[in-house]
Image (cartoon, rainbow, N blue to C red):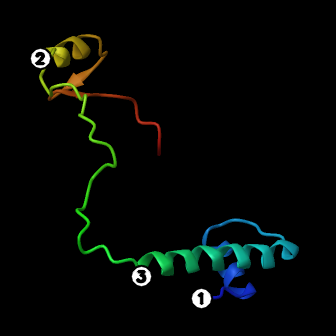
Amino acid sequence: MAIVNNEVQSIATLARIEIKPDEVPEFAAELTKILDFVTRMNTIDTTDVEPLAHPLDALSHSRQDVVIDDDICGTLQANAPQMENSLFLVPKVIE
């Protein structure tokens, strides 16, 4: 699938990037190579390949989701100059 120069300009406009006119043919060639590679990848038979979430058998080292300070709201609200119904009251800044 060949990308032509006006398609490169359209893609650049959509991506909000500036491409100089003399760079357009080079970008067209590179994008064509990328799309050709993707087309080749789509022809590979993957019927016996198991899907995977990560290429390495790594364990997640995430911490447990536990409450470590259950009264932080009270501590934070104690420092507020004004509160109403558990909400911070602030001066209006936009008219």
Question: Closer to the camera: disc 3 or disc 2?
Answer: 3
User: Where in the figure is residue 93, as x and y percent of width and height?
Assistant: 46, 37
Per the image, label 3 sits on a secondary structure element best described as loop
**Of callouts 2 and 1, which one flags the residue occurring earlier in the amino acid sequence?**
1
Which of the two discs, 3 and 1, sits closer to the camera?
3
Is tag 3's residue or tag 1's residue first in the polypeptide sequence?
A: 1
Pinpoint residue 79: horizontal percent, then vertical percent.
29, 11
- Check disc 3 and report the residue beneath it: 43
Q: Is residue 88 depicted above or below 7 in this figure?
A: above
Q: Which mark is residue 35?
A: none
Please state the total of marks drawn on the protein image: 3
- Please tell me which residue lies in front, 85 or 24: 24
Instruction: Give the SS element for disc 1.
Output: loop
Q: Which mark is residue 70?
A: 2
Q: Would you call the spot at circle 3 few (<14 residues within 10 Å), some (14-19), or many (20 or more)?
A: few
Single out the residue that lies furthest toward the right.
22
Q: Residue under label 1, please give it.
A: 1
Element under disc 2: loop
The residue under the point 64% across, 76% down is: 33
At label 3, which amino acid type do we have? Thr
Residue nearer the viewer, 61 or 75 = 61
The answer to which quarter of the image holds residue 32 is bottom right
